[in-house]
Image: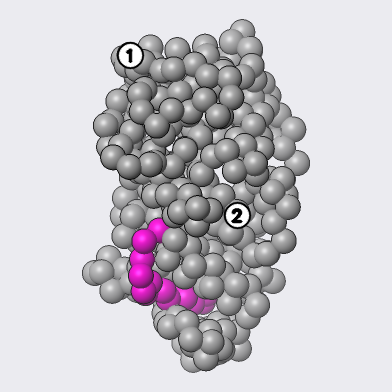
């Protein structure tokens, strides 16, 4: 089987479907063939996740990353992050948010020491994370701050054969225009191309989306395409990156659906999210792009409405784990 990357996995928000998703995914042999799994979090959360999922996964308790074995069952490092008494399935909880962040911090510290090659976390709840002390708009900005990232970073969503990035993320729609700059578009496109290379695309086909309806209709419906987006794409071409577009947002995903594009740089959150979730909500993965360690998670949320019922589908969780393992392998090879 060869040497596999070490993949740290957290249970996400203990009040949501994360623990049961991890339990269901751990029953898949392809995941264990791809990586050495180390579960990180409370033992009771793992036990509860298995109970809800109807799983019985044997794990090996360890206390240090050096104890990770090349063979055998998944390892688990139990760290006390959240008290069982403070968790109610399906409810936003300060304690669950704090616990999810503490488990992630533990993994980030390990990544900075090069003890792990990649991280995958089960779904988080942003409201709970903020109530639990996260002073950022989302987990990506928390990661970037904790890892002292100075270069451009952004969130990617992928269905495996189609990736999207975006110029602006979790901001009000009214604020989007101020993010539409040549520098941000070029940085996002460069990072998209680089990240797809790391995910196994030899020559990624990347295009940028227009901002305005019909691509601005020659300037009669907005000038961002003429003044900013098209010039940014042209400058990228001059650098040697074959970035296409801009294409109108209402047709660019038809090109992707038909297999003509591998990635789309969108201008704002829902421009890409609506299309990707329609094309494959149950298998979508989010990649935290621009960080020094690969970090992935399912693209869906904590699904509080079905938490604790055993009904959650684990395909997106499984795909997030497999992608983290693939990207972790590249990082492991790079470090030698």
114 on left or right of 117: right
**Separation of residues labelled 1 and 2 (CA atoms):** 34 Å
Q: Is residue 122 above or below residue 228?
A: above
Residue toward you, 22 or 71? 71
Task: Tell me, yes or no, whether the highlighted magenta stretch contains residue 3.
Answer: no
Quadrant in which residue 167 is drawn: bottom right
> According to the image, label 2 marks what residue?
291
Measured from the top left, where is residue 84 in percent x and y? 59, 10
Measured from the top left, where is residue 268 in percent x and y? 55, 64
Q: Is residue 18 above or below residue 116?
A: above
Measured from the top left, where is residue 115 in percent x and y? 57, 38
Q: Which residues are magenta?
A: 199-215
From the image, which quarter does the N terminus lie in?
A: top left
Estimate how packed mark 2 is, as few (under 14), some (14 to 19) or many (20 or more) residues with alpha carbons within 10 Å: some
Measured from the top left, where is residue 287 in percent x and y? 49, 51
- Point 69% across, 48% down: residue: 147
260 on left or right of 104: left
- Point 71% across, 29% down: residue: 132
> According to the image, label 1 marks what residue?
56
- Point 31% across, 68% down: residue: 256
Q: Evaluate if marks 1 and 2 touch, with contact meaning CB atoms under 8 Å apart.
A: no
């Amino acid at each position: 089987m060869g040497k596999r990357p070490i993949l740290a996995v957290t249970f996400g928000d203990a009040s949501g479907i994360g623990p049961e998703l991890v339990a269901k995914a751990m029953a898949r042999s392809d995941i264990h063939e791809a990586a050495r799994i180390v579960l990180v979090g409370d033992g009771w959360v793992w036990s509860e996740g298995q109970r809800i999922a109807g799983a019985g996964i044997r794990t090996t308790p360890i206390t240090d990353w050096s104890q990770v074995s090349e063979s055998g069952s998944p390892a688990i490092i139990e760290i006390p992050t959240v008290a069982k008494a403070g968790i109610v399935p399906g409810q936003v909880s300060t304690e669950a948010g704090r616990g999810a962040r503490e488990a992630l911090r533990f993994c980030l510290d390990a990544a900075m020491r090069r003890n792990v090659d990649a991280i995958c976390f089960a779904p988080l709840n942003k409201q709970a994370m903020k109530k639990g002390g996260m002073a950022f708009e989302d987990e990506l900005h928390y990661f970037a701050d904790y890892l002292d990232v100075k270069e451009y970073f952004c969130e990617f969503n992928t269905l495996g054969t189609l990736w999207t990035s975006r110029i602006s993320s979790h901001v009000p729609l009214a604020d989007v225009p101020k993010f539409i700059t040549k520098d941000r578009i070029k940085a996002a496109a460069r990072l998209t191309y680089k990240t797809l290379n790391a995910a196994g695309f030899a020559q990624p086909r990347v295009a940028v989306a227009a901002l305005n309806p019909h691509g601005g209709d020659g300037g009669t419906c907005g000038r961002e395409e003429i003044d900013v987006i098209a010039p940014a794409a042209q400058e990228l071409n001059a650098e040697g990156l074959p970035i296409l577009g801009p294409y109108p947002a209402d047709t660019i995903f038809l090109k992707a659906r038909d297999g003509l594009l591998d990635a789309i740089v969108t201008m704002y959150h829902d421009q890409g999210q609506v299309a990707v979730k329609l094309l494959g909500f149950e298998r979508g993965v989010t990649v935290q792009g621009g960080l020094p360690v690969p970090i992935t998670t399912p693209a869906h949320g904590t699904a509080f409405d079905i938490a604790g019922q055993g009904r959650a589908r684990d395909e997106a969780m499984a795909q997030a784990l497999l992608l983290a393992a693939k990207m972790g392998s590249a990082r492991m090879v790079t470090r030698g």
